[in-house]
Amino acid sequence: MTGFVMFLHASVAVFLIVIILMQSGRGGGLTEGFASAESIFGAKTNEFMIKATTGFAAAFLITCLGLAVLSAQKNKSLMSEEALPVTQVPTTATEVVETAAKEVGEQVQAIEEKVPSKPSTEVPAEIIPEDTPVVSTP
C-alpha cells in the first residue's frame, strides 16, 4: 500500500511541476515552448491550467497526508502489547532520600567487593621534588 501511494505521490508531483511550468506568467512561461497546448485545450487554456493546478495540488496534499499516516502506523512498537513491570515511585522527600541512600549503599558495597581485602606490602617510594638537592647518607 505504501509503495502505491509513493508512486502516486511522485507521479502527481511530476504532473504538478509540468502544469505549473506550462502556465504563462509575467515572462511567458513554457507555454510558448508548448505551442500545441493552445490547440489542445482551445481558447480556455488559462482556465484549464488553473483547474488542473488546483486538482494536482489537492492530490499532492492528500498523498502527503496519506504517506504521513502510513509512516506513523509503521513506527508502532511490536512490544506495545507486552506489559511493563510496575515499579513503585517514591512520593515523599523522605522516601526519595531513603531510596537514593539504599542505591548508593549498594554501589559502595559492589565497589568494596572488587577492591582486594589485604593491603599491599610494598611501601610507595617518596616523591622528591626536582628542585630539592638529594643528600646521600653514608
Image (cartoon, rainbow, N blue to C red):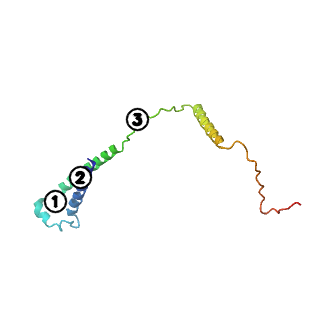
Please identify, in this view, whether the residue under mark 2 or under mark 1 is nearer the observer: 2
Say which residue appears at 25% left-offset and 53% top-offset: 7
Secondary element type, mark 1: helix
Amino acid carrying label 2: it is Leu
Closer to the eye: label 1 or 3: 3
Quadrant where the C terminus sits is: bottom right
Q: Earlier in the sequence, mark 1 or mark 3?
A: 1
112 versus 128 height, above or below: above
Q: Can you tell which quarter of the image residue 91 is in?
A: top right
**In this figure, which residue is indicated by the disc labeled 2?**
8
Badge 2 marks a residue whose secondary structure is helix
Q: Specify the label residue 82 is tagged with.
A: 3
CA gap between label 3 and label 2 equals: 37 Å
Give the residue type that dot 1 points to: Asn
User: So how many labels did they put on this image?
Assistant: 3
Q: Is residue 28 above or below residue 68?
A: below
Task: Check disc 1: other Cα within 10 Å, few if <14, some if 14-19, many if 20+.
Answer: some
Q: Nearer the viewer, residue 29 or 134?
A: 134
Residue situated in front as seen by the camera: 90 or 122: 122
Q: Nearer the viewer, residue 118 or 86?
A: 118
Tell me where residue 17 sits by quadrant: bottom left
Relative to 34, 66 lies left or right: right
Tell me the amino acid under the disc marked 3. Glu
Decide which of tag 2 and tag 1 comes sooner along the chain: 2
Numbered disc 3: secondary structure: loop
Q: Which mark is residue 46?
A: 1
Point out residue 19 in the picture as x, y percentages from the top left corner. Answer: 20, 59
Q: Residues within 10 Å of mark 3 (few under 14, many from 20)?
A: few
How far apart are labels 2 and 1 at the CA level? 25 Å
